Image (spheres, rainbow, N blue to C red):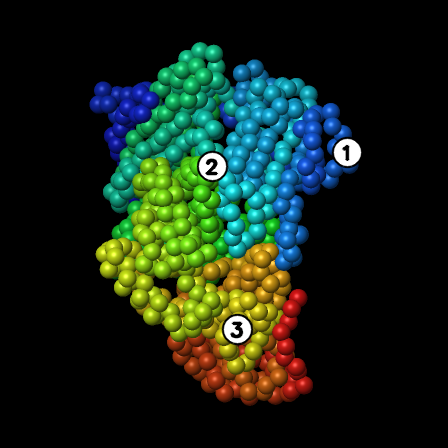
Amino acid sequence: MPSRRDMIKFGALAVVATSGLAGCGTNGMNSAGTATLTGRTGDSTGARTDMRIDQAWKFLKQGFPGAQEPELNDASWTTVELPHTYNGLDAQTGAPYYRGPAWYRKNLELPQAAREAGKQVFLYFEGAGITTEVYCNGHQAGGHIGLFAGFCVDITTFINRTGKNLIAVRVDNAYNNHIAPLNGDFNLDGGLYRHVRLLVLDALCISPMDDGGLGVYIKQVNITPEKAELEITTLLSNASSKEKTAGIGYSISDHTGEVILTASAAQPVPSGKTVRCVQNITLPHPHLWNGREDPYLYQATVEIFDGNKRTDGITQPLGLRFFHIDPDKGFFLNGKSYPLRGVCTHQDRPNKGRAVSDADYRQDLDLIYEIGATCVRMAHYQHAQASYDAADKLGLVVWAEDGLVNGVAHNSEFDNNQLQQVRELIKQNFNHPSIFFWSMFNELGNNGQENLGYDLVKQINAEAKKLDPTRPTTAADDQSQYNHIGYITDIIAFNRYPGWYGGKMTDFPTILDDIRKVVETKAPGRCIGMSEYGAGASIFQHESHVTQPNPGAYWHPEEYQALLHEHAWAAIKDRPWLWGTFLWVMFDFASSSRHEGDHPGKNDKGLVTRDRKTRKDAFYFYKAQWTKEPFVYITDRRFNCRPDKHAIVKVYANCRSVELSLNGRSLGTREGVNGVFVWPETVLKEGQNHIRAIGHHSGGHVEDACMVVYDPRTVHHATYR
């Protein structure tokens, strides 16, 4: 890396300010036509106010005519704090859950910054649904159709600058055949289940009204180790009564916060209009965002000035990277092979449903990082910004997904809403360096209709490519590789469950090779991934001699899940042509239609329990494959009251060898296969048995220990909790 002095020098020569769409002009240009480094300065008055208003909402779980009126007495309503859903409890029981309307009301007094004349006031909802109507002081100010995207409502014309304001929000999560997902193997919770924010903006500002997007979009046009060519698009809005000329300041800071490059431009913005300004910037010798090894983040800031007054500003993470996918060798990051091996995840918690906290989001990503995953599929909808933020910082490659799941409705409203959802997904998440793929659907046609939604998928795929040509589109297809819908997106991945939903766990190699053979025949050079595979598991159910269970029954022994993943990984690791593999699923989650395993209303295919308290055995199997920090783990530790004295002791470790002892007596040292170490003929004594494993590695050793009980009187039966 060059010195800061060189960076500034090269930056000044490299930042080329060109005319953009809407005639974005340059400001502060030298005679060579390059932007000078004398960035605009000004006072901080007029900058945006962005604050959460999550506290003290009144809630009523029913429809209520006139609930938007300020005069309504809501003293008897429940007081709640956001995020909030009214399905956190009923949707996890396995019974039908409430799908209908509810109301939220809040008295809001504006902060001082919003009381100035000319200020614009907006409400930004990070997630609400499924349909939302927003009222301010009795007037309908806006709304939204869709469950997973953020949206912004302008309440400027209805707000009282001083005194109290009544914000009322009607949400309804009833089935609606105009909105995807129509159904799915997860619950469609209603409510204000993500944060609500108050935005106060100057009349001259970055528009917040672009499908919920930030209004600043940083396209990575061409990234190499030598230079990073960026195209920054800014949407400028002027709510004043006369035309203004916006001064635009651009700056890039390194990870310490030191500004290393600046540029500036000027853009006329007519009264009452929103225009687009495009600025091209080149950063020499960039420090690349390099996945888990080095998720280096710059910060890119765009500031707006009206004369010398700073009126707005937005800072975004900037992770510079380039990538490609080879149909034979898989995924490459920054020119080097970077196998994508990871998990799928939902956003869901016990008793909270989808109304989870920022700390919950970060815990989920930390657990995914702990297992050693290089990638994560955030299924089956747009996730909260906190999740993508965490992935940016941790260096996890993200598959971001649209909400088109299982089925389509044949009406224009549904099609239009799907186009809207794709626009929202991409615009709201455009700047996240962790996102590499836009997914267009999951399992369309699993009701037996091949190529269901073919024309719609072509439309939304074209929309995605128009909005973002820099990232490939993909999909999770559970249909035959002979179908047509799987060939619309740039790349494809398949959901396959041998050994769970039919077939045997030993079928993985044959299934993968058959898929590739057919796809190569139909579309030579097409890149193939695996978007789902796995099996259910209860930490309360165990067996010594593992047999394939019925997936719809109440017996899901933990040992079977682990063994299936051992077989799956053996097939996956030997097929580098898989561009990415995503096991289903990282965490157990609520699904009201399921009545299986140890609890109704739960999909138990997670490697971690729904409360995040227990890592199942299969978690440690993958940790042994994907991590380098030495560890050793004794499996079957929850099978601690056994009816058979003859035991197979299995250990997962990423060490070169493991020594096992039982009740203080060594049973010998083993070398593992794929991180699996087995002592097949271990005899337990009646009562307590203490097992100790010592993993040896080049730097020393690591240990694990547990206790199991052998009791010949134990009656083994399915546990249903």
Name the N-terminal-most of marks 1 and 2.
Answer: 1
Query: Decide: marks 1, 2 in contact (CB < 8 A)?
Result: no
Rounded to the nearest angstrom, the CA distance separating label 1 from label 2 is 38 Å
* C-alpha span from label 1 to label 3: 53 Å
Q: CA distance from mark 3 to mark 2?
A: 42 Å
Q: On the image, which quarter does residue 425 sit in?
A: top left
Residue 413 badge: 2
Reading the image, the residue beneath label 1 is 75
Front disc: 3 or 2: 2
Q: Quadrant of residue 233?
A: top left
Q: Position of residue 533 (x, y in %)?
A: 43, 63
The label on residue 549 is 3
401 is higher (above) or lower (below) than 677: above
Spot occupied by residue 190 in the image (x, y as percentages of width and height): 60, 43
Residue sitting at 31 percent across and 66 percent down?
A: 514
For label 3, count other residues whose C-alpha is less than 10 Å away and answer few (under 14), some (14-19) or many (20+).
some
Asked if residue 97 lies left or right of residue 636, the reply is right
Dot 1, how many residues are within 10 Å of its Cα: few (below 14), some (14-19), or many (20+)?
Answer: few
Q: What residue type is disc 2 on?
A: Glu
Between disc 1 and disc 3, the foreground one is: 3
Circle 3 — which element?
Answer: loop
Q: Residue at x 56, y 15 (%)?
A: 117
Q: Are marks 1 and 3 in contact (CB under 8 Å)?
A: no
